Amino acid sequence: VWPKPSKLCGQDRPIRGSYDMVHYGHSNQLRQAKAMGDYLIVGVHTDGEISKHKGPPVFTQAERYKMVQAIKWVDEIVEGAPYVTTLDTLDKYNSDFCVHGDDITLTVDGKDTYAEVKREGRYRECRRTQGVSTTDLVGRMLLMTKTHHSNIDNSDYQQHTDNFGKGPKGHSPWTGVSQFLQTSQKIIQFASGQEPQPGDTIIYVAGAFDLFHIGHVDFLETVYKQAERPYVIVGLHFDQEVNRYKGKNYPIMNIHERTLSVLACRYVSEVVIGAPYAVGKDLLDHFKVDLVCHGKTEVLPDRDTADPYAEPKKRGIFRTVDSGNGLTTDDIVQRIIKNRLQFEARNQKKEAKEIAVFEAMKRQAEGEQAGDTAQAAQ
């Protein structure tokens, strides 16, 4: 946690949420929030609060606290933040205003959790990132088709949207599934843009980093601590390569989604998009790599059965690091499958509440428009 200035200049503002299964959509929300002021405080709810208002979380509160703190735009987190944001909460943390996405969050009884701060003008919105939501990711894991991240028009995926992004009486504009479209501008917004400086230790790691999670964060933090001035480069394998060595229907997230997820991590300086599986001479020389790290997980051979880390081992710059966290993407999928019925119920309940609020807002807007028309006619 970066130390909070003793005297705040400009605007200090909090943002709060569940941050269950943190993804690049959450990171983009926090990036936008940070751009609105000087110091970003993120409140993260407890497991009990999330279960009460939304349903069972996928990750524990301890895991979620650490995941949010690892996002590079976050200055401070508040553990166990209240689910309903009040003026007292803002004043407690010397905050000028709070920020949330342009979707809506509701209490268990269907009330807007930001109603009070909205009335007092201490609320601002940032744009929701299209193409991803926790609801969608849970659905991808439960469906696990090979086309879950490349073709949302196929029949299997359409069935997924019916189950997880559509209620019995309509479609929520906030929870529904849409396709993520990567742009160069989005990558620029997430990238640090900083070149390695003289004296930096350039460290290279490679992998899928699918469903970027606390296991990845602990590994990258351990890698970051291998040097006094680390410059960590993450090589991300293309989807086809990931599927070759992981099998089943991995990856859950495509290469574009995984790129943003990794770039949002405070321990990462640069990402190689579509890195070769074998860490060879050309890559090491091009990036002037000083150290290559790998976790305790098994190193699978390349297509030609060769050791993908043969060259860094030959140079004496290969190091196996132990983060102490053995969580894998497979483990997360198993958590979801184990509690399938609970997550299905959670998503459908959330969708139904959102539709009810959206319809009420639409009726109110139509009523106001009709009133304005009648007044103009007079």
Image: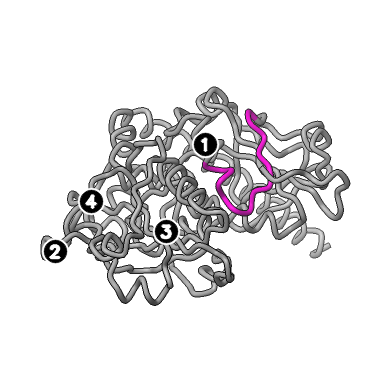
Contact, mark 2 vs mark 1 (Cβ under 8 Å): no
Marks 2/4: CA distance?
13 Å
Q: What residue sits right under mark 2 in the picture?
A: 303
Numbered disc 1: secondary structure = helix
Q: What residue sits right under mark 3 in the picture?
A: 178
Categorize mark 3 by other alpha carbons within 10 Å: few (<14), some (14-19), many (20+).
some
- Range drawn in magenta: 67-80
Numbered disc 2: secondary structure = loop
The foreground one among 349 and 59 is: 59
Q: Nearer the viewer, mark 2 or mark 4?
A: 4
Contact, mark 3 vs mark 2 (Cβ under 8 Å): no
Q: Amino acid at mark 2?
A: Arg
Residue 299: which numbered mark, if any?
4
Residue drawn at x 79%, y 48% is 12
Q: Earlier in the sequence, mark 2 or mark 1?
A: 1
Q: Is residue 72 magenta?
A: yes
